[in-house]
Amino acid sequence: MVLFRPMLVLLFLAAPAVWPAKLPPAEQAWAMLKDGAADKSPIRRAKAVHSLGLLKDRQAQGMAEKALGDTDKQVRIEAAIALGEMNARTARPKLHACLNDQQIQVVLACTNSLYRFKDPIAYDVYYALLTGDRRSSNGLVQSQLDILHDRKQLEKMAFETGIGFVPFGGMGLQAIRTVAHDDVSPVRALAAQRLATDPDPKSGKALSDYVFDKKNKVREAVVEAIAKRNDPALLKTVTTLLYDDNESVRFDAAATVISLSRRRAPRAKPSTVPQAGPAAPGVSK
């Protein structure tokens, strides 16, 4: 039996904590989440914090806000995601503070939640992601902007984004499929898409500047964003993409040109007062 004791010890250590069965299920559940969020393992903490997003109450929000200060990057990411999922709008100040996080993945997770809350500061970050420059004192700090000019770090970020970075939503799977051949276009494409709803004219100008981006995915996203902005001032710019070498871009551009062409200034209503015109031949006034 002695030979099996090490294995028994390992099984005991790996087993989840057991709470008294006499506790109501809800109390057992809270105990489980609290223990998980405070666990020594960052992986277990991240899993527990991620699950907080399924709850919408102050206790869960408080736990997620606390996790924003965790020493592990993935835990902070999950905390930011959870706050967005639970629609914790009162957590905006803490999410703002996290925009100064040294890990850009954490910044993007916070930005995504702020975007869900329709917080204008999110657009500053997406603008910086697309262009590599800041348009205001908000947005990415200089150290984060430096990453945008470092190809290797960008590829690493895109890879991590594709595998386990929920804030990009539908872009995640696309990132997995393209990152090996297409560096970070999914990341920049998402930034372009998010700028579609930004009322700041600078975002419209940025989209206009990137209609000739080298990456097809970025050009597609830019055209779609222009279509959603519904700004006739961008019609001339998007018209040039009718001759793009990528068929998807051309089709998107065609639909956008049609849509924007309909956005003409309304014609002046005809006056109800009859106007005196030249007399018809043979008719005296």
Image: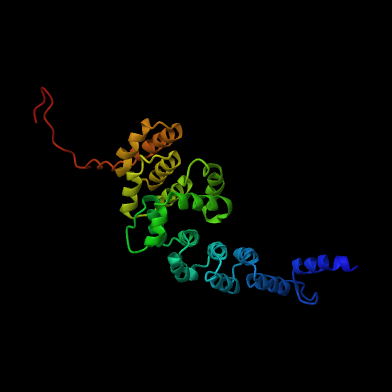
Question: In the orientation shown, which residue stands out farthest toward the top?
Answer: 282
- Please provide percent x and percent y for residue 149: 39, 52
Q: Does the rendering let one see residue 123?
A: no
Q: Nearer the viewer, residue 110 or 175?
A: 175
- Please provide percent x and percent y for residue 132: 37, 53
Tell whether 132 sits left or right of 285: right
Tell me how many marks there are. Answer: 0
Q: Nearer the viewer, residue 1 or 79?
A: 1
Q: Quadrant of residue 25?
A: bottom right
Q: Quadrant of the N terminus?
A: bottom right
The residue drawn where x is 46% and y is 68% is: 92
Q: How is the image coloured?
A: rainbow
The residue drawn where x is 80% and y is 69% is: 9
Q: Quadrant of the C terminus?
A: top left
Q: Nearer the viewer, residue 235 or 153?
A: 153
The residue drawn where x is 44% and y is 60% is: 118
- Please provide percent x and percent y for residue 101: 46, 65
Q: Quadrant of residue 138?
A: bottom left
Tell whether 258 sits left or right of 68: left
The residue drawn where x is 63% and y is 70% is: 37
Tell whether 137 sits left or right of 29: left
Location of residue 12 with respect to 231 vertically, above or below: below
Q: Does the rendering let one see residue 93?
A: yes
